[in-house]
Image: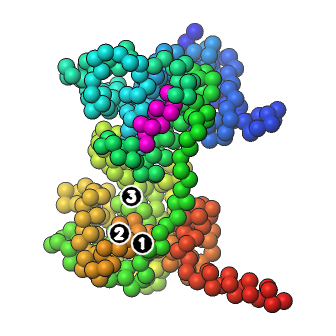
Amino acid sequence: MKSYDVKFWKIKRNASSKQPSYVVRWVVGGEKQSTTIRGSELAKNYLSDLRQAAKRGEWFDTVTGLPESMLKAKNARTWLEFATAYVRIRWPHQAATSRQAATESLTAVTPVLVTDRRGRPSVDVLRRTLRDHVFLPEDRCSEPGHEGAAALRWLEEASLPMRDLEEPRHARAAVEALAVLLDGKAAATSTFRRKWAVFHHALEYAVELGELAANPLDRIKWKPTRQSNAVDRRVVVNPRQARELLTAVSYVGRTRGPMLVAMFACMYFAALRPAEAAGLREQDCVLPEEGWGQITVTKTRPQANKRYTDSRRTFDERGLKHREEDEDRPVPIPPELVAILRAHIEAFGTAPDGRLFYTRGGGTFSGSAYAAVWREARTYALLPAQVESPLAGRPYDLRHASVSTWLNAGVHAPEVAERAGHSVEVLLRVYAKCIDGQRDVANQRIEKALSE
């Protein structure tokens, strides 16, 4: 029986379970529903999926408690049907970059999760069909041509039943597909880990819906290589080098370089991420004539393929990374950056919506555009050997330099983490190797202890 009368309760810890598990509870048409999920984040995601379905106006089944979209995924007979439903369920509350990552990952594994049938199209055709006509919301899927329609029919007939994914050999084949790029070369560890995480989450979702008894990835002896994610100290510039690079940016092009100096300065003096700097507005800034000012980071403008953004443009406006949607982050800024921003506003003004950094057409500088300016500026500011080195190889390295400078100056880690938008744990793990002088301090303390 279908019902639109849905109420949600808070997630509660399952006290009777030895291993941490959580109970998601809701009511459909007066019928109480619940499911127990291992892991608090998975439980939160599951409840979020239910809430999103209700927001979209989907009916809920009073027997299973599931909304229309999740019921389709649960009743899916093949991997292709399940993966398509999974993408569409997750789409509304994912960022554009996460949507793109999901599509890329599922597009990589789906061609190997098939039976051996005659008439198999080429891998390129299969991937193009999945990317353009399958793993998108229905209103974004274009009609495939003759070649794409034939490939889609073949996939529908050849796709493995969901129960077959419980065989480790199929999970292993999928992981092997994730480990290589389109050209057959081995994928970078970070790329593999990102795609593996998406596939793992999709299978966990299948377990939650009862499509699989257990996640088959947990049974194969192939785990993503652990990464420290620590910043390479070779990319970190010192204050003198940073200022020389900012000056060099002003020499690039007739207007583009001068318009980007302040944006790069925000990355260095305020440790803003590029997407945060791109979303900075005049109303977010306190810029006194003397002394320290403040930037309140409220929005970001991450870049993604148009097919994955809500606006159908290259940039979506979103909330801050790892924070609630309406949460902001105040960052005190030194007088030097205050002066740079005041001069920038006086010279270039703002976009109609108040943004400080915009193109002639009022848009946002693309990553390739400001990266090209940065590459040229490095050739002006650095020695030839330094240009060939990793030193400040990317604009993002200015943020690394900023955080490293704060830590080396003795600013307490919690304060640095708050300004940079990190947790203290991530901050120390990522930047530990960039804190100069700590080895000498440690040696002195050990020597003093041994002499007592």
Q: Are marks 2 and 3 in contact (CB under 8 Å)?
A: no
Gap in Å between the C-alphas at discs 3 and 1?
A: 20 Å
Q: Nearer the viewer, mark 3 or mark 1?
A: 1
- Please tell me which of labels 1 and 2 falls first in the chain: 1
Q: Quadrant of the N terminus?
A: top right
Quick one: 268 or 219, which is closer to the camera? 219
**Quadrant of residue 306 in the image?**
top left
Q: Is residue 50 left or right of residue 348?
A: right
Numbered disc 2: secondary structure: loop
The residue singled out by tag 2 in the image is 393
Q: Is residue 301 left or right of residue 121?
A: right
Q: Residue at x 53, y 50 (%)?
A: 225
Residue 202 spot, x, y in % from top left = 51, 32
Q: Are marks 1 and 2 in contact (CB under 8 Å)?
A: yes
The residue singled out by tag 1 in the image is 235
Q: Residue at x 39, y 65 (%)?
A: 396
Q: In the orientation shown, which residue stands out farthest toward the right? A: 452
Name the amino acid, label 2. Gly
Count of numbered circles in the view: 3
Q: Residue at x 40, y 48 (%)?
A: 187
Q: Main secondary structure of the magenta part?
A: helix
Gap in Å between the C-alphas at discs 1 and 2?
A: 7 Å
Task: Classify 252 as above or below 142.
Answer: below
Q: Is residue 171 magenta?
A: yes
Q: Give the residues drawn in magenta, as a range.
A: 170-179
Gap in Å between the C-alphas at discs 2 and 3?
A: 18 Å
Q: Nearer the viewer, mark 2 or mark 3?
A: 2
Task: Classify 66 as above or below 325.
Answer: above
Numbered disc 3: secondary structure: helix
Residue 407 spot, x, y in % from top left = 56, 76
Please tell me the numbered disc located at residue 275: 3
